[in-house]
Amino acid sequence: MEDLTLSDPVLKAQFSQRVLIKSILSRPDGGAGLAGQTVKIGGWVKTGRKANKDEFAFLEVNDGSCPANLQVIIYATISPLDQLVSTGASVHVEGKLYVPPEGKNKQKIELKVDKVIHVGPVDSAKYPIPKTKLTLEFLRDHVHLRARTNTIASIARIRDELAYATHTFFRKHGFRYVHTPIISTSDCEGAGEMFQVTTLFSDTEKLEKELITHPPPSQADLEAASVLVKDKGGIVAQLKSAKASKSEISAAVSELTKAKESFSKLEERSKLKPGFPKKDGKVDYSQDFFARQAFLTVSGQLQVETYACALSSVYTFGPTFRAEHSHTTRHLAEFWMVEPEIAFADLEDDMKCAEAYVKFMCQWLLDNCLDDMKFMVEKYDKGAIDRLKMVASTGFVRLSYTEAITILEEVAKEKVFENKVEWGVDLASEHERYLTEVKFKSPVIVYNYPKGIKAFYMKVNTDNKTVAAMDVLVPKVGELIGGSQREERYEVIKERILEMGLPLDPYQWYLDLRRFGTVKHSGFGLGFERMILFATGLENIRDVIPFPRYPGRADL
């Protein structure tokens, strides 16, 4: 692309009164070709300092559109400088772009302010995000302001690009995006670590307060109401017997109806008792909001399968939840999953799709988010870009679980693993990372796992010992994707549900997919935050999601 000139003006943002700083600085000439143009920009001051005896000030302004700041020069004759130089202040200014003197600034363009449109001042003594270097741990305590830091802003842009890449990849390959429910009555993993959704607590509290204010009727009240119903019924009978007028009988019937309704309400209130509704000594969830137990979903997979068995190629991408009391750097209570499901596809097709998807995302970041990736390389992980290039261009090694265990058992003779290596146990993160980082130095797909360590919906292989499951392992994080061919045989999956100790009733709808027009199908789930950890090289998953939720913390 040729350098741009004055004949190629910078474009104003379509829905705000400014131009994006990215549209100035990301040009091939660094914005130099825009010299002489008058523009409005808006952003937040990263650093500010007065110069030449407070005659003017230099501001480094960032609007979040890119990692780079635009240097802004403003004279005291235009606006008081004190409120402008504070880190965190917002500014909306108009001025002329010009090329700075050579050697004075690494940028090729600066803005000299002619007019200050708005200033959002900051009390520097109270602002919790100063320009000094801050730890990621500290920023987690100021989650509402941490997006103003270079690191969290870069992560936000990388996350956005990966989300866009996800939708682009699946759209390109004919998949339909399906919104699966956040509230679920099925446990996809069978792990039981689910957040329950219920109104019983609030309903019970409300009832207890109401019973104090308006106590339930006494037995005497009920008897009096019952007597009144009999009396009113007797009057109706007498009027009919005496062949009274239609209007008289109607009026009496109306009075009887009111008496019956009043008695019914009193009888219903007499049954109200404080505490949770119980049946056979257990909580009666038929009295709950959904008339059954409900939870926050751990996966949209089971639900999206219903659409795969109608639209063929589908995916869901949304939040999932796990009530696991874990404080590790790899666990969140709320996290996002990308879950495609493909009809008429076996495990081989599933592995091909997973590999293509991961490669696509890596290349997308290299093509569309390189400035932010360079920032991550400079500040956090020098190998981040090389890792993306390697994964984008390398064929994934494939080996069976049995082959993986054999390799690890040989290694375990010389290298000490913290976790035991033997056939029948799940691979730990240290095993996964050894295979991908040390043994093969490339992404690895391990397939055909023992059925005893995998979910009920995975297709049982002919050996009746393993299932057609696969995990994609990558450097830095280990398991990135877990998937399988789904069990399409009705009797087999029914038996598997029972083997896992799960009740059949909540899964009758899922079994219907096998009863009516069953089809071979496969799918997988990618932990979106794990993909960001892999891309950026950051260590803690709490730093790659905008609003982290984990035991003891749910800020905002």
Image: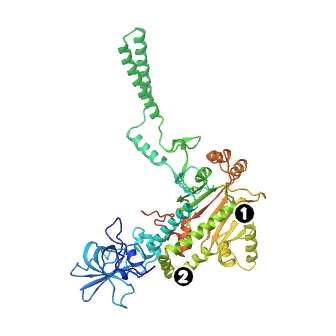
Report crowding for label 1: few under 14, some 14 to 19, many 20 or more residues within 10 A (C-alpha): many
Q: Residue furthest top?
A: 242
Which x, y percent locates residue 315?
57, 58
Task: Give the camera-side residue of 233 and 35.
Answer: 35
Quarter of the image for residue 428 reads bottom right
Marking on residue 382:
2
Q: Residue furthest right?
A: 463
Residue position marked by numbered label 1 in the rendering: 448
- CA gap between label 2 and label 1 equals 35 Å
Q: Is residue 124 left or right of residue 405?
A: left
Dot 1 amino acid type: Asn
- Counting residues from the start of the chain, the first of labels 2 and 1 encountered is 2
Q: Secondary structure at mark 1?
A: strand
Quarter of the image for residue 362 reads bottom right
Residue 328 makes an appearance in the image: no
Q: Residue at x 68, y 45 (%)?
A: 515
Dot 2 amino acid type: Lys
Q: Residue at x 58, y 53 (%)?
A: 304
Quadrant (top left/top right/bottom left/bottom right) for the C terminus: bottom left
Report crowding for label 2: few under 14, some 14 to 19, many 20 or more residues within 10 A (C-alpha): some
Which x, y percent locates residue 427?
68, 68
Which x, y percent locates residue 105?
37, 87
